[in-house]
Amino acid sequence: MVKAYKQEHVYKHPWERVSAASWRKFADPENKRILSHILEVDTLNRKLDTETGKLHTTRALTIHAPGPWFLHRIIGQDICHCVESTVVDGKSRSMQLTTKNISLQKFIEVEERIRYDPHPENPSAWTVCSQETSIRIKPLSALASMAEKVEQKCAEKFMQNSIKGREVMERICKYMEAESAPI
């Protein structure tokens, strides 16, 4: 069984500001309290493709694993390592992030895709964020009958964390807007 959900959010900020805020989301010390599930973020690779003009970045994320406490007990850890791959296309004004867990794969597979694009109704001032997340608990003899409930709990936690992430992005965008405003 796979638990999947989609969310869409409109930032009333231009794509350039929202995409820049995305890079600053984990770096801002004020956000550590709100995004307390993110323990560490390291950039592994950054490459600008000179032919296409696209920026490709790979980051390693260490997070407090989502899910109920009893899942942590069964798995034996509450830390999860993930890889985030980002492609920014400045020409088409698109930013795509894909994050997958690389640890705990015997137990759970999570994939999150986020895309930032100019809003079709107001492309110069608004940005639409599309987020798709899929969570799959792998059958374990101890959890086979509970897999669906565990997936639901994990999905609920991811949705709570995505709300926090949007709050952080809004705050950073407003801060950046204030930075760029004439004095």
Image: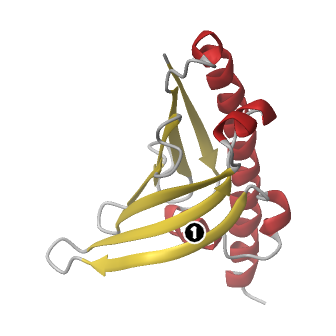
- Scheme of colours in the image: secondary structure
Rendering coords of residue 114 (x, y %): 49, 47
The relative height of residue 121 versus residue 1 in the rendered view (above or below) is below
Left or right position of 148 against 88: right
Rendering coords of residue 33 (x, y %): 85, 63
Rendering coords of residue 23 (x, y %): 56, 71
User: As rendered, which of 4 and 145 lies closer to the eye?
Assistant: 145
To which residue does mark 1 refer? 17
The relative height of residue 65 versus residue 16 in the rendered view (above or below) is above
Tag 1: amino acid: Arg
User: As rendered, which of 82 and 124 lies closer to the eye?
Assistant: 82
Q: Residue at x 77, y 63 (%)?
A: 171
Residue 176 falls in image quadrant:
bottom right
Q: Residue at x 65, y 14 (%)?
A: 146
> Which residue appears farthest toward the bottom when viewing the image?
183
Residue 97 falls in image quadrant:
bottom left
Rendering coords of residue 44 (x, y %): 43, 76
The relative height of residue 23 versus residue 8 in the rendered view (above or below) is below
Q: Residue at x 74, y 55 (%)?
A: 37
User: As rendered, which of 39 and 126 lies closer to the eye?
Assistant: 39
Left or right position of 98 against 5: left
Q: Is the C terminus in the top left, top right, bottom left or bottom right quadrant? A: bottom right
